[in-house]
Image (cartoon, rainbow, N blue to C red):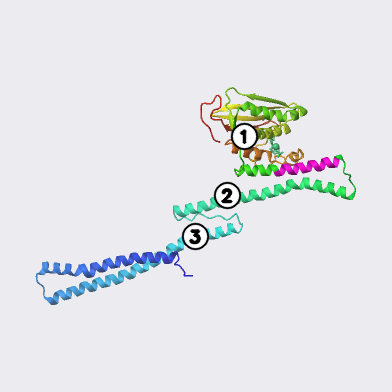
Amino acid sequence: MTRRPGLTGRLVIAQLLVVLAGLLTLAAVAFVIGPPLLRRHLRRAVGTASPQLSRHLEDAFLAAGGIALAIGTAAFLIAAVVTSVLLTRRMARPVRALADAAARLADGDYTARLDAPHLGSEFEALTGAFNTMADALESTERTRRRLLGDVAHELRTPLATIEAYLEGLADGVRTLDAHTLQVLGAQTTRLHRLVEDISLVSRAEEHRLTLARATVPAARLLEAAAAAVRPAYAAKGVDLRVTVAPRTPALEADVDRLVQVLVNLLTNALRHTPADGTVTLAAEPVGAGVMLSVADTGEGIAAEHLPHLFERFYRADPARDRAHGGSGIGLAIARALVHAHGGTITAHSAGPGLGAVFQISLPAANDGPGLQGSNVGG
Ligand SMILES: Nc1ncnc2c1ncn2[C@@H]1O[C@H](COP(=O)(O)OP(=O)(O)OP(=O)(O)O)[C@@H](O)[C@H]1O
Ligand SMILES: [Mg+2]
């Protein structure tokens, strides 16, 4: 393999080409244009000079030109080499730092970052882009690790229960009675739901979810969701109110998926609202779109949890929420499905004890009743 010149070599070659062009021009001036000019001036000044005098003068002129060229060449060459070496040294440092940092990233050290090189806007842009990329990689890696840990954690409890029951059966400590079957069935269902939920979030987040969209009045969505949770609300004694504001436009939505989102929110609200509390499911027009909301008068949510609620497996109170049977994935599913519909979902709470409100903004269907505007994204 032939070795190609490095940065210093290339810079020196480039400068030498400039020097060569300069020298050729100077030589042409000194040896081709200069002598006839000298002769002409001599003739004008002293008339016809003796051949001896003209040769003398011409020799002196050529010698002066030659010496000037020689000294000039030496000075040019030294300056070219010195500036090339200094400049490359200055440029090589950030380039080497970039290569080192990239190698560290490739080795799995996601803390690798570059310092500002102070070498002009191009290097600043390169360093900035590298650091942004490293930030994104670090955050992805953190999420991946946490996710793996969370999945393992969620699988452990049902698997341990199933294992304990099976061992009990094998040892003859337990019999295959209705209770054992119920426990085994419930844990298997829990595992199954977990797998389904994880798969649904992944598909939705990777945009691999096909939505069966149709134009649907907001009221129909709310009624379907309310109907699904009403028995549970009645059993706990929590009041469920449904309100649809006048002129609320229709939605272009996959009904089953949006009902699933609302049921997730209503189930959460019921779980976190004591008996005699109220949960309000509402729809109203906002701009050219629709806002759906689920507001409860329950426990509320502390401010530090609000930004994380929609992350997979995030629970404000892990021990208590898990005891309720939640795996912390319901809101991640809700967000992924709302995003798939081109909408946004947000959580609000004035604090613990003050209830919580979840709001979903969605674009309205183009031909929705009461709608003059066009779709809005989220
Ligand atoms: N209405 C609410 N009031 C108070 N806290 C809430 C409310 N809704 C959600 N949360 C908090 O947000 C967390 C995440 O909710 P999410 O629906 O994602 O998980 P989950 O309900 O615990 O489990 P899953 O929905 O998977 O069964 C809950 O664990 C709870 O701490
Ligand atoms: Mg939930």
> Residue 96 at x, y = what percent?
51, 61
**Residue indicated by mark 2:** 136
Can residue 305 be seen here?
no
N-terminal-most mark, 2 or 1: 2
Given the image, on which type of amino acid does mark 1 rest?
A: Asp
| Outermost residue to the bottom | 52
The answer to whether the residue labelled 2 contacts the one labelled 1, judged by CB atoms less than 8 Å apart, is no
Mark closest to the chain's N terminus, 3 or 2: 3
Q: Secondary structure at mark 1?
A: loop
Above or below: residue 102 compared with residue 240: below
| Residue tagged 3 | 95
Q: Secondary structure at mark 2?
A: helix
Query: Nearer the observer, disc 3 or disc 1?
Result: 1
Q: Amino acid at mark 2?
A: Ala
Q: Is residue 298 left or right of residue 137?
A: right
Distance from disc 3 to disc 2, alpha carbons, whole Å, reads: 21 Å
Query: Which of 45/343 is in front?
Result: 343
Q: Which residue is mark 1?
A: 254
Question: Is-magenta flag for residue 182?
Answer: yes
Residue 282 percent coordinates (x, y): 64, 27
Q: Which residues are magenta?
A: 179-195
